[in-house]
Image (spheres, rainbow, N blue to C red):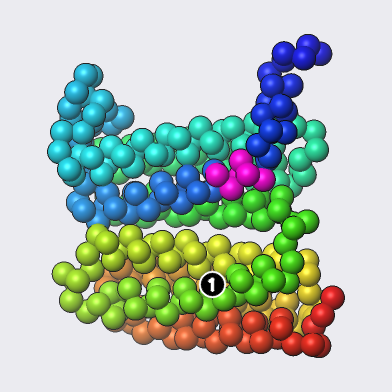
Amino acid sequence: MSSDSPTSRLRSLIDRFGFPHLLATTLVLVAATILLGVAAKATGSGLACEANWPQCDAGPYNLFPANLPSFYEWFHRFVAMFAGFAIIGSALASWRVPDIDTRVAALVVAGMVLTPIQVILGRETVLQYQMDILSLHFWTAVLIFALFIVATIMVWKPRLTRTHLTGALALGILSVPFHVVLSPFVLTDITNYSPTVQMTQYGVTLALLTAVIASLMIGYWRLESRRTIGLLAVTSVLAFVAIFLGRRTVMTLNPVLDDLYIFVAIGLFGAFVASLVLTRSNSDRI
């Protein structure tokens, strides 16, 4: 095989920057795309660019935004383009570089397979702007984000210790009350649920998702106590339910869902605290 082959050039690039750093960069770009999508929706910019896709409403070939609402939508697409390239690059690297764990490769390739589906859903949010399509677009993005969280944590596994587990649990403990405080349940006047508040809450949502996945994975690798690992698994289930209900309370403003969301959030907070106490106890050392 020639030293100038695409595989050798890709391997050289990975050797220079590191596959773990490539995955971490991709994860950041995916998170930024999600938050910019939230900003576009919250500011009412989803139908900006005069409902054109993938073009916008100004400049040569209508490639650029004509006003601030169009800029939100245009910038969301702009960052999403780079996130898509990073996802594809990560998938190619994971598949063609021989020393990458096949499980990591499967996760990243799954993210790549979902990417064109996500692009089509993004187009439909502009052309049809229906709540079902918006929700599917959001949850597909969250699924891609989750896949890359798991893949990124797996490639960083040798460097992750109980200290990182403690940090993940602490992040979860901090995220839960902020997630509740920034929700419509507390901000009972919907006019207070501003675009800035919405972006912040969804940022907290991504932090909560990262914390619970990281704590479960690192706990499984670094802890011996079945009781603590089981509690981390319960915490993960509660976190996913809280994230889902938090999204539903925004979409429906249903009092029953609000009460259920608060109940689950209280349980989640308690589970995080209990997990932190158990992981720091002398009875659960490696």
Q: Quadrant of residue 72?
A: top left
Q: Quadrant of the N terminus?
A: top right
Taking 159 as reference, is 1 above or below it? above
Give the magenta range: 20-25
Q: Residue 168's spot in the image, x, y percent?
A: 60, 70
Residue at far front of view? 16
Horizontal relation, residue 6 to residue 180: left or right: right
Horizontal relation, residue 1 to residue 107: left or right: right
Taking 77 as reference, is 154 above or below it? below
Q: Residue 196's spot in the image, x, y percent?
A: 27, 61
Q: Quadrant of residue 157?
A: bottom right
Residue at 17% of width from left, 27% of height from top?
58
What main secondary structure does the magenta stretch of the protein show? helix
Is residue 23 rendered magenta in the image? yes
Horizontal relation, residue 113 to residue 226: left or right: left
Q: Say what secondary structure mark 1 lies in.
A: helix
Q: Quadrant of residue 281?
A: bottom right
Residue at 44% of width from left, 65% of height from top?
205
Taking 159 as reference, is 129 above or below it? above
Q: Residue 175's spot in the image, x, y percent?
A: 47, 73
Say which of 235 and 127 sits in front: 235
Residue at 48% of width from left, 76% of height from top?
174
Q: Residue 36's spot in the image, x, y percent?
A: 34, 49
Horizontal relation, residue 144 to residue 249: left or right: right
- Residue 254 visible from this viewpoint: no
- Residue 107 visible from this viewpoint: yes
Taking 111 as reference, is 176 above or below it? below
Is residue 279 rendered magenta in the image? no
Residue hosting label 1 = 171
Say which of 277 and 114 sits in front: 277
Amino acid type, residue under disc 1 in the picture: Leu
